[in-house]
Image (tube, rainbow, N blue to C red):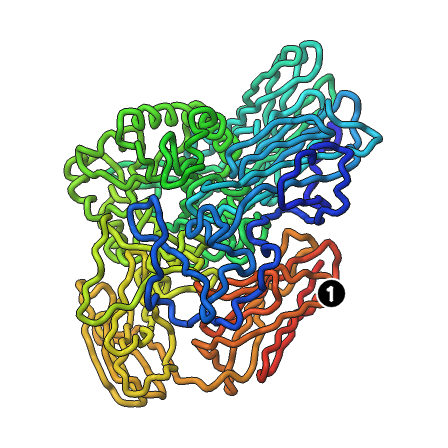
Amino acid sequence: MSPNPRALIAFDNDWCFLSSDHPEAERPELDDSAWRRVDLPHDWSIEDLPGAPKTTAPWTPPVATWTVARVPAKPSNVPIRTASWPDPSADGPPLRVGPFDPNASASTWGTAWTVGGVGWYRKSFTAPTHSAQDRVEIRFDGAFGETEVWLNGTKLGSNIYGYGAFSFDITAQLRPGWPNVVAVRVVNERETSRWYSGSGLNRHVWLTVTGPVRIAPWGVAVTTPNIDSQGADVQIDVDLKSHLAEETIVDIYARLRDATDQAVGEGHARVLVHASGTGQGRVAVRVAEPKLWGPEHPHLYSADVSLVVQGRVIDSSSVRFGVRSVAVSATHGLTINGEQVKLKGACVHADHGILGAVAIDRAEVRKVELLKQHGYNAIRVGHHMFPAAFLDACDELGMLVVDEVFDVWELPKFRNNDYSKHFKQHWRNDLERMIRQDRNHPSIIFWSIGNEIPERNAPRGVEIAAELREAVLALDASRLITAGINGPPGSEGEPARRHLDVVGYNYMQKYLDADHDAYPDVVFMLTEQWAKDIHDGWRKAQACPWFIGEFVWAGIEYLGEVGAGSSMLLPVGTPPPTSPLPFTMFLWDYPAYLSGCGEIDILGRRKPQGLYRDVLWERSALELLVQRPTPPGTYEWLSDWGWHDELESWTWNSPGQTVIVRAYTHGDEVRLILNGREIGRKPVTRADKLTAEFEIPYEPGELVAIGFRGGQEIGRKKLVTVGAPATVRLRAERTNIAATPNDLAYVFAEILDAQGRIVPDAAVPLTFAIEGPGRLRATGSANPRGLKSFSDPNCTTFHGEALAIVQATSRSGRAVLRVSSPGLSSDSLDIEIG
């Protein structure tokens, strides 16, 4: 056979961008020389607003995360108090800084006070080399929000669903030998999202060149319908599209390779495709003694598919897949390859913190790596399709995935311009895109058809669920169907559960036993769970096969839904205000811009609730934290998604004040030692939920907790009072990265005292600078009120840390990152790019 005839061309570089509307921007002759040059992926909502200051100076954000006093509420159609913003004040933060402006933000707290609008992208290019019969396609991996595309002044089409890939055949509009201009208009106006979505061409763009008979977009589906002790039946279904004027006999060849590139099987099928028509072929291959894909051993294979017409290869494609079986039952629970698996899950949104919503490949991979290294084995994507690089990482690392497509159906959810207005017309196409694009990822074990859908229990909602289920199964019957349901339980909620293989409950743990008693054959999981309830949820998963696990909301901190996991101070003796809903959230106001509920913070560091989880999953025998002392006469009131403001710190400016110390352990006793003397000893029973809590007067020095089980020491943790900040130290997750803008180096700046110890509550100003073939893409801290220009090299640390993200260029060499702070010793770090 001839070499691969399919050409895949990266199309990310050298676009022109205009951050406003233009009446004639689709015209190829338009002079766009004054437009800004950008590379993709690009998110204009994370970029600085015109004329906005870079920082909040002279106002500085507090280090305590609680709210002291609420600002007056703004009108809202949400039935509970949400985050609001103050009037301008000389002693408060500016209301316009970096990308943030609550007065200009359509979705305000939902999208982290950022601004959408209309943006135009244009790119001039030379048509790729191709023959007269070849086909050329442009593919967008995603764009938020509503998108229209033109080539050389001819409109190619539009896209509504902002999270899925879409493509257009551009062969007829190309002008070989002449400049070609593609123009893209992206509209993200009014209230389009409940969370930070970003705006613009925030995922990759590609050109593809194929022969006249080609594999349709996402037209290869690989399944393993039969697996036994001797081997596996691999089924490769291929969708074809012909652009020839006559009937064509197409030979489909499939060759399977393992991870070492060794051939493990091959097959062939012949298909007759009508003139300018479509066709489908199926190739069956038997693989002997396959290595199975699973969470612990994620073995992957590749299927190389070639189309041959009259002895010539005219198109080819390679897809990865895994050999694995998935089943559920109330008796045996969730089994993968016949082995029971409990879901240790986390929900995540698609943004990357201070990078915004740009789908840079390394950021996607790192998100999965962080969750995997902290013990999670499952991810629920919220609440839409994620980039291919993210799912590829899940495949490679053995992460199980709930792939979710819709947050709304026909009824809106507190937003005046969300997807509900398009659902009737577009749901089938968008659902089918998800299945076709994602179906070869072995990590995906569930298709989720919706999240907290308002009409889920009404007759029309039940009808929609049935239609969605039918559409999913028509394309892929190898996976389970679920949805995130937030009530009602019992017989009243049966309609909403009727078309699901596994029932996903959001925050409904207290109803599980009764619903299991009434419906003993139903399998349940918690598709969203509060961190405060993870102890009881995990114990139930361990004990009950019909309950297969849970997904905490959220695994990683994210932009928007400001203050979902938050707290505020109340006077001692004052009960918390009542809520019209059965939960409390949104206790923060501007300038807070984060959700507050991630178990991993915006920079990628473990938060206190994550350390508690490490003990719960017995990844750690003991963790020791101290709650930040509240002002006298006050206490910290938490939202249901919140967690106390705890630190691994014994450095407080409150001598003699009573502080709360919590030791988390899976032992049965904890001893607490302060400056060499035992000051407390407590048993830890099942009712204590792994927690020994002590109230002691603060005294500088050394605090040690020792955990015991059956009289034997199982763990020891020490906290010491550290000195004043003396130096800045740079620490990189990786110091060797590839020479491509798709790779990033995450570099932490840590504030140390004179003895080299991290100062846990240090808030000091930093300035970063870079030399060489790297770009300082973003800087910031995990302070939920630390809003700033993320492209600015200046930032202030939080909990003694800040982050600089260095993006590689296409040039190889050594980049040098430097950091300095007034009065502190500086540091530098080399990053090898190539």
Q: Quadrant of the C terminus?
A: bottom right
Residue in the image at 26% along x and 44% along y? 547
Residue in the image at 50% along x and 50% along y? 104
User: Which image quadrant is residue 388 in?
Assistant: top right
Q: Is residue 156 visible?
A: yes
Classify 10 Å Cα crowding around label 1: few (below 14), some (14-19), many (20 and above): some
Q: Is residue 343 left or right of residue 58?
A: left
State the image coordinates of residue 313 (x, y, percent, origin top left): 72, 25
Q: How many marks?
A: 1
State the image coordinates of residue 171 (x, y, percent, origin top left): 72, 25
Q: Quadrant of the N terminus?
A: top right
Q: Nearer the viewer, residue 332 or 171?
A: 171
Q: Is residue 768 left or right of residue 31?
A: left
Residue in the image at 61% along x and 42% along y? 119
State the image coordinates of residue 84 (x, y, percent, origin top left): 38, 56
Q: Nearer the viewer, residue 265 or 351?
A: 351
Q: Nearer the viewer, residue 734 or 124?
A: 124
Q: Is residue 124 above or below residue 108?
A: above
User: Which image quadrant is residue 69 in?
Assistant: bottom left
Identified by mark 1, the residue type is: Gly
Q: Nearer the viewer, residue 819 or 159?
A: 159
State the image coordinates of residue 541 (x, y, percent, origin top left): 26, 49
**Disc 1, SS:** loop
Q: Is residue 256 visible?
A: no
What residue is disc 1 on? 772
